């Protein structure tokens, strides 16, 4: 469907290694290939397995550029920010090797599309005289807040005044956010550490990229996409979401990881539940609850008496909190330890609500499925995302807040019960409106699909 002239254009993709960043950028890559581009994806030994299915489907148009990189494990919520900082710095060591690779290539890329955590790639693109596009795995509102933070560099409050609020008056409809809710990477910088200047430079470079592509859509975040265009001073900001796999959703069980449960078993369990009776609980790929948090949540799920699927990370402490829990909820509750096939779950008619940490991908996936959310933002851009989905779009209700919060299990049980039982609750009605908008925007003539075409056309040299 793409003009013949674009065929064979070569793009270099630089992903960040964590699932929430890697998954949507791989989806974008597949869409680029379907529009006739040749793509090289920078990979490490860790990410190569995730890339392999894509390469075997399109062996002549996708190549991996595997570069040696030793990333420290990014696990453990307590020092998640420091793990992320280390990983950002380590990825930055690829600047030189990638520049050398481009210089020696017989048909070098004409554009680099790089993750938000690889901001150095925009300088690299300038050095070799090609275009660069920032890929934002965060939404447009969150990206606006991130840009404002790094540009304005607000000062941290004293340690005992973490509740001091920060406003973003130039961004439309923003509440104030307490200091502790601002991006962990940003707070770490203000508290001073050796990696910080590199990270600051990279974020500032992001706001000076040639173009910006956001996993969002105009009907969802139009005001913030307009705001981003004002911030970067040009109109090359393309909302192309919701980015999804190209294969049918039921067969996307291995997206981003190998499912810890047979998708067919899970689906037949869900088939045995009534429509909209199941709560899906998952806090993304990074968060690990402490034992007391797991205990409070288990107790809430038990008291709520609703059906549920709960994803618990394998390296999360659960010994005490989940002792005999699964026996007590047998038949109505399923605990998945490890990686869950999130898309097939969210899109199953039995799933009626999603208790989420408000990671941007999870939000987009819930909107695609028309599933209303219970919001428990924990870190990163999730507090900003919660503002969008709970206070503005009203497709979610807040139930908890903060990475170390221990919810009151009685209150949480009641909130869950009410949400599942109330068939026409406003959030469910609104979620269904967003589901249709999301389907339309990706369809023929929809704004995201047209924006995608515009992006590819602009990137062409
Ligand atoms: N995901 C999944 N199975 C899991 C956990 C996460 O498929 O058990 C996927 C989820 O569908 C989403 C991504 O991993 O695409 C998580 O991204 P998100 O932005 O929601 O959160 P993060 O992991 O970045 O905190």
Image (cartoon, helix red, strand yellow):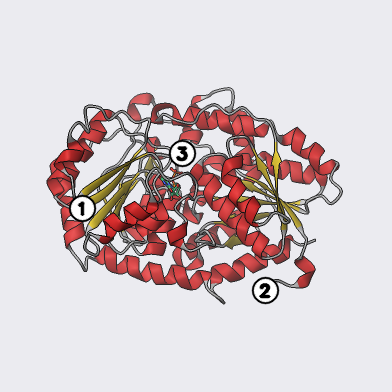
Q: What residue did someone put label 2 on? A: 1
Q: Is mark 1 within 8 Å of ligand 1?
A: no
Q: CA distance from mark 3 to mark 2?
A: 40 Å
For the C terminus, the image quarter is: bottom right
Q: N-terminal of the two: label 3 or label 1?
A: 3
Residue 2 in the figure: left or right of residue 256: right
Q: Residue furthest bottom?
A: 445
Residue 6 in the figure: left or right of residue 118: right
Quarter of the image holding residue 105? top right
Q: CA distance from mark 1 to mark 2?
A: 44 Å
Q: What residue did someone put label 1 on? A: 307
The disc placed on residue 332 is none
| Horizontal and vertical percent position of residue 226 | 54, 62
User: Is any atom of residue 143 visible in this view?
Assistant: yes
Residue 334 in the figure: left or right of residue 283: left
The disc placed on residue 183 is 3
| Horizontal and vertical percent position of residue 234 | 66, 60
């Amino acid at each position: 469907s793409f003009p013949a002239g674009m065929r064979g254009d070569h793009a270099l993709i630089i992903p960040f290694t964590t699932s929430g960043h890697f998954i949507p950028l791989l989806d974008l890559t597949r869409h680029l290939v379907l529009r006739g581009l040749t793509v090289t994806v920078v990979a490490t030994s860790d990410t190569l397995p995730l890339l392999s299915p894509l390469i075997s489907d399109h062996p002549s148009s996708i190549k991996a550029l595997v570069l040696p990189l030793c990333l420290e494990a990014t696990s453990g919520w307590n020092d998640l920010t420091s793990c992320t900082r280390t990983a950002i710095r380590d990825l930055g060591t690829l600047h030189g090797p990638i520049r050398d690779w481009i210089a020696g290539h017989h048909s070098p890329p004409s554009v680099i599309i790089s993750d938000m955590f690889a901001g150095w790639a925009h300088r690299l693109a300038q050095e070799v005289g090609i275009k660069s596009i920032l890929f934002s795995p965060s939404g447009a509102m969150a990206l606006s807040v991130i840009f404002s933070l790094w540009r304005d560099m607000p000062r941290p409050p004293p340690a005992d005044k973490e509740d001091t609020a920060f406003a973003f008056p130039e961004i439309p409809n923003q509440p104030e956010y307490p200091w502790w809710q601002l991006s962990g990477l940003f707070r770490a910088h203000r508290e001073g550490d050796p990696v910080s200047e590199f990270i600051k430079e990279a974020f500032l470079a992001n706001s000076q990229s040639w173009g910006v592509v956001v996993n969002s859509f105009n009907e969802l975040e139009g005001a913030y996409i307009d705001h981003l265009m004002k911030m970067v001073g040009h109109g090359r900001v393309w909302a192309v979401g919701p980015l999804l796999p190209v294969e049918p959703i039921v067969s996307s069980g291995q997206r981003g990881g190998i499912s810890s449960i047979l998708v067919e078993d899970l689906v037949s369990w869900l088939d045995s539940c009534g429509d909209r009776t199941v709560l899906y609980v998952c806090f993304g790929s990074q968060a690990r609850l402490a034992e007391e948090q797991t205990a409070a949540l288990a107790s809430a799920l038990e008291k709520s008496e609703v059906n549920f699927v709960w994803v618990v990370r394998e390296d999360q402490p659960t010994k005490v909190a989940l002792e005999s829990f699964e026996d007590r909820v047998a038949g109505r509750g399923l605990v998945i330890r490890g990686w869950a096939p999130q898309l097939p779950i969210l899109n199953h008619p039995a799933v009626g609500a999603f208790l989420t940490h408000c990671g941007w991908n999870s939000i987009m996936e819930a909107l695609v499925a028309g599933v209303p959310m219970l919001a428990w933002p924990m870190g990163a851009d999730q507090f900003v995302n919660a503002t969008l989905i709970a206070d503005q779009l009203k497709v979610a209700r807040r139930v908890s807040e903060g990475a170390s919060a221990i919810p009151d299990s009685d209150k949480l049980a009641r909130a869950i019960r009410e949400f599942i039982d109330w068939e026409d609750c406003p959030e469910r009605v609104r979620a269904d409106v967003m589901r249709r908008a999301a389907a339309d925007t990706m369809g023929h003539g929809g704004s995201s699909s047209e924006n995608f075409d515009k992006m590819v056309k602009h990137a062409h040299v």
